[in-house]
Image (spheres, helix red, strand yellow):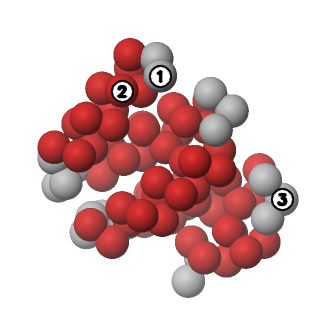
């Protein structure tokens, strides 16, 4: 796992008040070609954050990218 991705994961696990860490971790996974893992991480941790709008939008983007309506709809609820 590249260093930056590892740092975002650590930051996300350490500070549950900053949704940007989760956003950047999921986006980093996507950039590594691990979009499905990014979706799984967003689904797992989304409930932990009050500021969910940006995270849900990223999830919907991943659903569109993967052409998976179920993923899109999960984040669009």
Residue highlighted by disc 1: 1
Residue 27: x, y in percent? 52, 39
- Residue at 56 percent across and 83 percent down: it is 77
Mark 3 residue crowding within 10 angstroms, few (<14) / some (14–19) / many (20+): few
For residue 67, which numbered disc appears in the image? Answer: 3
- Residue at 36 percent across and 26 percent down: it is 6
Mark 2 residue crowding within 10 angstroms, few (<14) / some (14–19) / many (20+): few
- In the displayed structure, 46 sits above or below 5; it is below
Residue 32 or residue 63, whichever sits in front: 32
Residue that sits furthest to the bottom in the current view? 77
The answer to whether mark 1 and mark 2 are in CB contact below 8 A is yes
- Secondary element under disc 3, as helix, strand or loop, is loop
Residue highlighted by disc 2: 6
Mark 1 residue crowding within 10 angstroms, few (<14) / some (14–19) / many (20+): few
Picture quarter containing residue 49? bottom left
Q: In front of the other: label 1 or label 3?
A: 1
- Secondary element under disc 2, as helix, strand or loop, is helix
The answer to whether mark 2 and mark 3 are in CB contact below 8 A is no
- Secondary element under disc 1, as helix, strand or loop, is loop
- In the displayed structure, 18 sits above or below 77; it is above
Residue 46: x, y in percent? 38, 65
Dot placed on the residue nearer the N-terminal end, 1 or 2: 1
- In the displayed structure, 34 sits above or below 45; it is above
Q: In front of the other: label 2 or label 3?
A: 2
Q: CA distance from mark 1 to mark 2?
A: 6 Å
Dot placed on the residue nearer the N-terminal end, 1 or 3: 1
Left or right of 6, for residue 65: right
Q: CA distance from mark 1 to mark 3?
A: 26 Å
Left or right of 55, for residue 47: left
Dot placed on the residue nearer the N-terminal end, 2 or 3: 2
């Amino acid at each position: 796992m590249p260093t930056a991705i590892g740092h975002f994961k650590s930051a996300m696990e350490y500070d549950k008040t900053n949704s940007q860490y989760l956003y950047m971790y999921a986006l980093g996974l996507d950039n590594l070609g691990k979009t499905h893992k990014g979706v799984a991480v967003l689904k797992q941790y989304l409930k932990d954050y009050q500021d969910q709008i940006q995270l849900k939008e990223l999830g919907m983007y991943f659903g569109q990218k993967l052409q998976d309506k179920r993923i899109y709809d999960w984040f669009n609820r």
